Image (tube, rainbow, N blue to C red):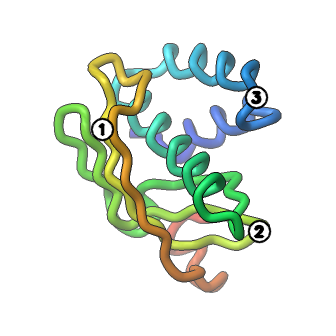
Amino acid sequence: MRNRELTAVILLSLAVVGTASAETRFERTLKMLMPTDRMAQLCDYTAMTRIRKDERQYRPDRAVANAQVDVKISGNTVEAKGGAFRSRGKWYAMSYTCKTNDDHLSVLSFTYKTGAEIPQEKWAAYGLWQ
C-alpha cells in the first residue's frame, strides 16, 4: 500500500478541511483509489477530524496510520495501533479502530486514543516529516 504517498496527495487536495466543498472533493478523490487505499485514507481523515473536534488542544493537519506499527486490515475494519498525527508542527502518537461500509466511503464506527508527543529525533525512523 502506498499509504504515505496517497496521504500526501489527498491531504494536499484539501485546501480547507471540513467545508462542504472539501468533503465533496475528498469523496471524489477517494473514489479514484483502490478499495483498501480508500479505506485507509478515509480512516486517517476521520482520525484527524475527530481529534480536531473532540480534543480542542490539537489541530491535526496530517495523520499516518502506520507510523510506528503496520496497520491490520480485516474486511471493512482498519486497526491502527501505531499511528501518528501532526498538530501545530509536532507529531503525537495515536491508535484507532475504524469500520467502514462496503464501498469504503462512509465510516460506520470509529474509536481512537491519542498519545504522547513523538520526539523529533524519532520522526525519520517513523517516516514522519516537518
Disc 3 marks a residue whose amino acid type is: Thr
Badge 1 density bin: few <14, some 14–19, many ≥20, Cα 10 Å: many
Task: Name the residue beneath numbered marker 3.
Answer: 19
Quarter holding residue 122: bottom right
Task: Name the residue beneath numbered marker 1.
Answer: 99
The residue under the point 37% across, 24% down is 104
Q: Which mark is drawn over residue 25?
A: none
Among numbered discs 1 and 2, the one appearing first in the sequence: 2
Label 3 residue SS: loop
Give the number of the mark in front: 1 or 2.
1
Compare residues 65 and 18 and report the one nearer the observer. 18
Residues tagged 1 and 2 counted as in contact (Cβ below 8 A): no
Residue 81 horizontal side relative to residue 24, left or right: left
| 61 in relation to 9, above or below | below
The residue under the point 58% across, 58% down is 54
Among numbered discs 1 and 3, the one appearing first in the sequence: 3
Q: Which mark is drawn over residue 89?
A: 2
Residue 2: image x %, image y %?
46, 39
